[in-house]
Structures are given as structure tokens and as C-alpha cells.
Image (cartoon, grey):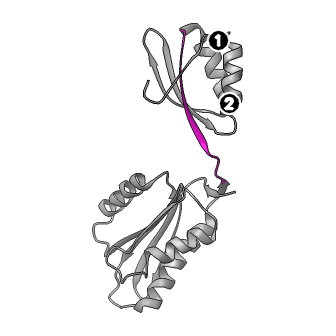
Amino acid sequence: MSLTLAAPAQHELIIKKSRFLGRVEPCADRAAALARVAALRAEHPGAAHVCWALLAGGHSAANDDGEPGGTAGRPMLDVLRHQGLDGVLATAVRYFGGVKLGAGGLVRAYTDCIAQALLTAEKVERVAQTELRCSLPYAQEGLVRRALDAAGAALLDVSHGGLVTLRFSVAATEAAALQARLNEASAGRIGWLGPAD
């Protein structure tokens, strides 16, 4: 069982006049992580470094952003791994205080600011999701929406044309049972679509 975070959490650390703003947050993939890091750079134009680490979908990435190699991104990644997390981005914005910390000091600072942020973060079980698409007559839309709510599915997109098309995600373990319930409740009037249909 892997865990993710219910919501972002942060912690500020000051070491020898350097300010470290550590943050952990749910993150789906590398593209989302890079967008978040770019946003942090824009929010903190005076920061010396915006280092980050990502564990998502079995993939990992770490970036030292100009700090000596292996002193920022990798230690933050190790903290995420040690906590058994997935789908999580750790970022640390550093404002340089004029005093060099050395490699060991940097590793401790980046590790601590992320570990402290994780102490206040709510961890939740990561549930694999499946995305489904279907088309149906307008008369069936209310029935399907109620069934999606009852199954805890997240409605991602709705379009109204000749038929109603719904795109939603649901726990992978619930997908087949939900499809069967909907097929039965609609008397077979729901058409299941592939991703490119």
C-alpha cells in the first residue's frame, strides 16, 4: 500500500541566515511537478534555489537547482521514499543568507525542511484510478450521475450533443462493478467509449 497526501503542507527553516521554505503536496506526474516548480520560481524571484523531488506512479526525479550535486533533490527524494509516499512533490525554496553550509549542512537542511513539512501533512491511502467514458440518452443522465456519486467517482467532463457523453474516474477496483450496475440500471442504453472515441 502506498500513501499520498490529502493536501499540501509546508515548513520554514532558518539555518545560519539562510531561509528554507519546504513544501510537500500531491502531484500526479512530472509535467505537473515542472509546472508547480515554475510557479514557485515566479512567486520567489529573489530565491537562490528552488530544489525539488518527485515520486509519482513509480517514477522519481530530483533536481538540485544549482546546489552542489546530491545535496538537495536526492535527500528530499530519500525522505519521500522513507515515508512510503507516491504521487508527491517536495519542493524547497532557499534564500541564501550569506553563510555557506557545506555539503553536510545542505543535506541536513533540505532533509529537515521536508521531513518537518511531512510531520504536519495528512497521509491517505493512494487508490489507483481508472478513467471511463460513456454516452447515453439525456433521460439517463440523472441516473448515471447518482450512480457515479454513490461509487465515489469523480466527474471529469460532460458534453451534450445528440447524446450525453460523460468522462469520469473511479477506483480501479470498482470500475467493472460500476459498469455492470450502470448497464443493468439503464437497460443497456449506455455505450462505453474508448479513450479516443
Q: Nearer the viewer, residue 50 or 173?
A: 173
**Mark 2: secondary structure:** helix
> Can you give x and y, in whole percent of width and height, for residue 86 in the image?
58, 59
Q: At x 51% / y 84%, what residue is drawn?
A: 108
Give the crowd class for mark 1: few <14, some 14-19, many >=20 residues within 10 Å.
few
- For the stretch drawn in magenta, the main secondary structure is strand
Instruction: Identify residue type, mark 1.
Output: Gly
Which residue in the protein does label 2 denote? 176
Picture coordinates of residue 85, whole percent (x, y): 60, 62
**Residue 128 included in the magenta stretch of the image:** yes
Q: Is residue 137 above or below residue 61?
A: above
Q: Give the residues drawn in magenta, as a range.
A: 125-137
Label 1 residue SS: loop
Residue shown at 42% from the left, 89% from the top: 103
Alpha carbons under labels 1 and 2: distance apart: 15 Å
Q: Which quadrant of the view contains residue 196? A: top left
**Which amino acid type corresponds to the residue marked 2 in the rendered image?**
Ala
In the rendered view, tell whether residue 127 sits above or below residue 116. above
Mark 1 lies on residue: 188
Residue 89 shows up from this direction: no
